[in-house]
Image: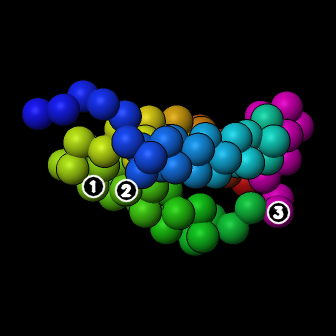
């Protein structure tokens, strides 16, 4: 079993980093303002469930780019979803 990082791993890590980082400004704005009026509860519920499934998928494959990115995104999405339910 090789522990060398392949080109596919680097591409996965870069894609994961970009998609996770792109989510952060919206999460930060929501945390800072507590304004959840523009967030759809249905969409965010489905999105959060999808991210959780991607996390499980990554764990089952042992695909660390998928695991790391989706663990971070899931934590942020859950926090926003909780705020949506609390502050609506």
Q: Classify mark 2: residues with Cα within 10 Å, few (<14), some (14-19) or many (20+).
A: some
Question: Relative to 48, is 38 on the left or the right?
Answer: right
Q: Give the position of the N terminus as an image quadrant.
A: top left
Determine whether label 3 and label 1 are within 8 Å by CB: no
Q: Nearer the viewer, residue 61 or 79?
A: 61
62 vs 20, left or right, is left
Residue marked by disc 2: 54
- The label shown at residue 57 is 1
Which quadrant would residue 44 be assigned to in this image?
bottom right
> Residue 15, can we see it?
yes
Q: What stretch is highlighted in magenta?
A: 29-38
Q: Can residue 46 be found in the magenta stretch? A: no
Circles 1 and 2: CB distance less than 8 Å? Answer: yes
Q: Residue 38: which numbered mark, if any? A: 3
Q: In this view, does 28 lie above or below 16?
A: above
Q: Position of residue 13 (x, y in %)?
A: 51, 41
Q: Tag 1: Cα neighbours inside 10 Å, few (<14), some, or many (≥20)?
A: some
Q: Nearer the viewer, mark 3 or mark 2?
A: 2
Q: Which of marks 3 and 1 is in front?
A: 1
Seen at 85% across and 31% down, the residue is: 32
Quarter of the image where the C terminus is located: bottom right
Horizontal side, residue 48 vs residue 22: left or right: left
Secondary structure category for the residue under label 1? helix
As drawn, the residue found furthest toward the left would be: 1
Q: Is mark 2 on a helix, strand or loop?
A: helix
Secondary structure beneath disc 3? loop
Sequence-wise, the earlier of marks 3 and 1 is 3
- Residue at horizontal 74 percent and vertical 61 percent from the top: 39
- Please say which color scheme the image uses: rainbow
State the CA–CA distance, disc 3 to disc 1. 30 Å
- Which residue occupies the foreground of this view, 30 or 73? 73
Left or right: 38 with respect to 19? right
């Amino acid at each position: 079993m090789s522990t060398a990082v392949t080109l596919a791993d680097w591409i996965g890590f870069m894609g994961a980093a970009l998609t996770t980082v792109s989510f952060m400004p919206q999460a930060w704005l929501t945390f800072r303002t507590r304004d959840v009026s523009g967030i759809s509860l249905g969409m965010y519920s489905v999105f959060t469930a999808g991210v959780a499934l991607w996390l499980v998928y990554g764990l089952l494959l042992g695909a660390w780019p998928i695991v790391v990115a989706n663990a971070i995104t899931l934590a942020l999405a859950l926090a926003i979803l909780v705020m949506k339910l609390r502050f609506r």
